[in-house]
Amino acid sequence: MSLIASDHFRIVVGLGKSGMSLVRFLANRGIAFAVADTRAQPPELETLRRDYPQVEVRCGELDVEFLCRADELYVSPGLALATPALQQAAARGVRLSGDIELFARYAKAPLIAITGSNAKSTVTTLVGEMAAKAGKRVAVGGNLGTPALDLLDDTVELYVLELSSFQLETTDQLNARVATVLNISEDHMDRYSGLPAYHLAKHRIFRGAEQVVINRNDALSRPLPVAGQTSWSFGLSTPDFKAFGLRERDGEKYLAYEFECLMPVRALKVRGAHNQSNALAALALGHAVGLPFAPMLEALREFTGLAHRCQWVRERNGVQWYDDSKATNVGAALAAIEGLGADVDGKLVLIAGGDGKGADFSALRGPVARYCRAVVLLGRDAERLRQALGNDVPLIHVASLDEAVEQCAVRAEPGDAVLLSPACASLDMFKNFEERGRLFAHAAGRLA
């Protein structure tokens, strides 16, 4: 494919998973494009050269003159829009866009759009399973699993997308049938100037939405009112009109819609208040697009949770072990500590630490003091965590995950739970959070 300056020429900037989906999409539609990546050897370079040898690709430092040959750049979520070369191209009239904006232009079926600092993968998966139970031809992906553009299919009846703040930065008009920001807490502060900038990026999901779902327990999840836009809510409080929440009947707690009890909380296989909140969010989203309650509740009863998200690992000497390695920020760790801490007979022995991404750990101190017997600290920001947690509970520094598991086994008592919920990214010590979780489960499994 020759490089020709025209009104219909595009450049894909970033050759990872989403970048490769853009390559397939553009090539299949005969749209002229080239590829650029800041890395010398991007992950999909070999695939691109094998399958699309005619496409021009430039690796290394971004060339502004090259970028300005296009009228639109599709920027990878992994590359900050503040990158000088991108800003210079934008100043010269080149549009900065992304794969989700392109998806929104071509998708014909209704879209459920989900973002949040935490729980978005769990809720996205749950809503997808609810739709499938209801007999819908549903496609699930985005930031989770399959890239959005690879899901496009005229036979699909409903799309369910998990979206990150990075993806939303390049999305102008999503036009979702229903959109939600599940919650907001500090995350990616190494990329954003502060919480307000992160909040604004998340709230782009509401642009053009017909309906919104808000979290009553998180004021930052609420968008500005729009005339004619239907609003639903979820939360752990008693629900009122157009709301999902918890009700008590005959001494038992129920998931409820408005004034109707739907199913007992004890019927959920996943534990903790945060998982009750996730179930209510999924019900609200499914109800907004017309899914019947019966199949949605059946999906809830069968759901066992996602890997590395407060996932049960084993029981040993009356102690339950949980892998919440996906808790890569403070908000996610708080949800697990408070949700699981209120749901176990004893206390938590917490493993935390890693790359804190510039976050403020101080919000952890109160819940740790309330629910934890001890905290085992490891990784790059272990010392910052120690300073934030104070001296309310014993804090133990370790050099490895194996040593952390050994310390937990010594300190946990019958009725307690050991919880890996790091509040930090994993890349200072591990390939990714999945590897961190697998190694934790393996180490826990080796205990006699």
Image: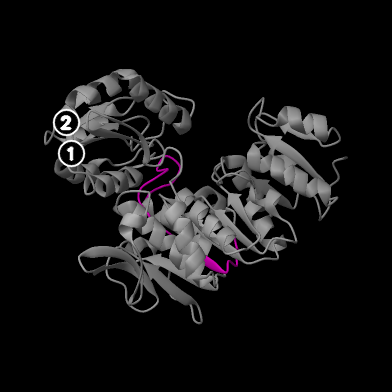
Give the quarter of the figure containing the N terminus. top right
**Where is mark 1, residue-wise?**
347
- Judging from the image, what secondary structure is the residue with disc 2 in? loop
| Discs 2, 1 touching: Cβ within 8 Å | yes
Q: For the point 16% across and 40% down, which residue is it?
A: 346
Q: Taking 181 as reference, is 318 left or right?
A: left
Q: Which of the two residues, 224 or 252, is positioned nearer the viewer here?
A: 252
Residue at the farthest left position: 392
Which one is earlier in the sequence, the residue at label 2 or at label 1?
1
Q: Which of the two residues, 153 or 17, is positioned nearer the viewer here?
A: 153
Determine if residue 176 is in view: yes
Q: Position of residue 10 (x, y in %)?
A: 76, 48
Label 1: few (<14), some (14–19) or many (≥20) C-alpha neighbours in 10 Å: many
**Where is mark 2, residue-wise?**
413
Which of discs 2 and 1 lies nearer the camera? The answer is 2
Identified by mark 2, the residue type is Glu
Segment tinted magenta in the rendering: 172-194
Identified by mark 1, the residue type is Lys
Q: Which of the two residues, 390 or 415, is positioned nearer the viewer here?
A: 415
